[in-house]
Amino acid sequence: MRTEYLEVLELLPVWQLRKPLPSSQEAVQDAPPVVTPVAQISEEAVSQTSSNVLMFADETSDLQLMHLADGVTNAAQQLLNNIANSMQLKGQPTSGKSLTEALQQPTKVLLVLGETLANELMSSQQGLQQLRGKQHTIEDRQVVVSYDLEAMLNQPAIKAQVWQDCCFAMSLLEDKQD
């Protein structure tokens, strides 16, 4: 089943698992994640935003996938659905919610697609390369940032990096459950 999703994301036949994945305990011992300092979401900053977001969540809402809703093409929507399916997030995306409404839902791990949304969420001006590959903490949420949908459609090679970010976000959820 995962093979089908990887083919849809155009990661196969290039992507192959070359060695077994380490258990979550080994991964934590070998390479601790980079953790950025806790950031507070100021109510003023969030209330000034008018961005609508697309969100997928798992059944418990412990893991959420978020992308800006504005200007999402049909191809981008299909890609978002494929990513959510491969992460085993259920249902159709909750759309048209403002960022304020989206942040009111309790979650443990948030995967944010896109530099604009990540900067808006964290009230920062950092570039995507500075945000990616790190675990950010906002209030009680662990946040992982990755490329947006249009970037993946324009540069299919970065889909592999997005999948790494998805796996990183899922591993953070597993670590919180231990």
Image (spheres, rainbow, N blue to C red):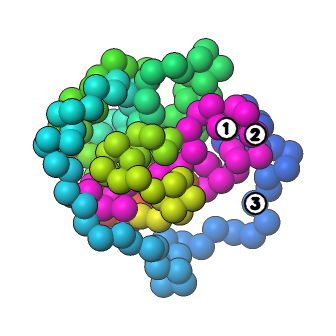
**Pointer 2 residue:** 156
- Quadrant of the frame with the C terminus: bottom left
Magenta-colored stretch includes residue 138: yes
On residue 152, the disc is 1
On residue 93, the disc is none
Task: Pick out the residue farthest to the bottom.
Answer: 29
Task: Pick out the residue farthest to the left.
Answer: 43
**Amino acid, disc 3:** Leu
The tag earlier along the polypeptide, 1 or 3, is 3
**Amino acid, disc 1:** Met
x, y percentage for residue 151? 65, 37
Mark 1 crowd level (few <14, some 14–19, many ≥20, 10 Å Cα): some
x, y percentage for residue 111? 43, 47
**Pointer 3 residue:** 17
Q: Is residue 117 left or right of residue 162?
A: left
Secondary element under disc 2, as helix, strand or loop, is helix
Give the CA separation, mark 1 to mark 2.
5 Å
For the record, the magenta segment spans 136-164
Q: Nearer the viewer, mark 2 or mark 3?
A: 2
CB atoms at circles 1 and 2 under 8 Å apart? yes
**Amino acid, disc 2:** Pro
Q: Nearer the viewer, mark 1 or mark 3?
A: 1
Q: Residue at x 43, y 23 (%)?
A: 69
x, y percentage for residue 80? 55, 30
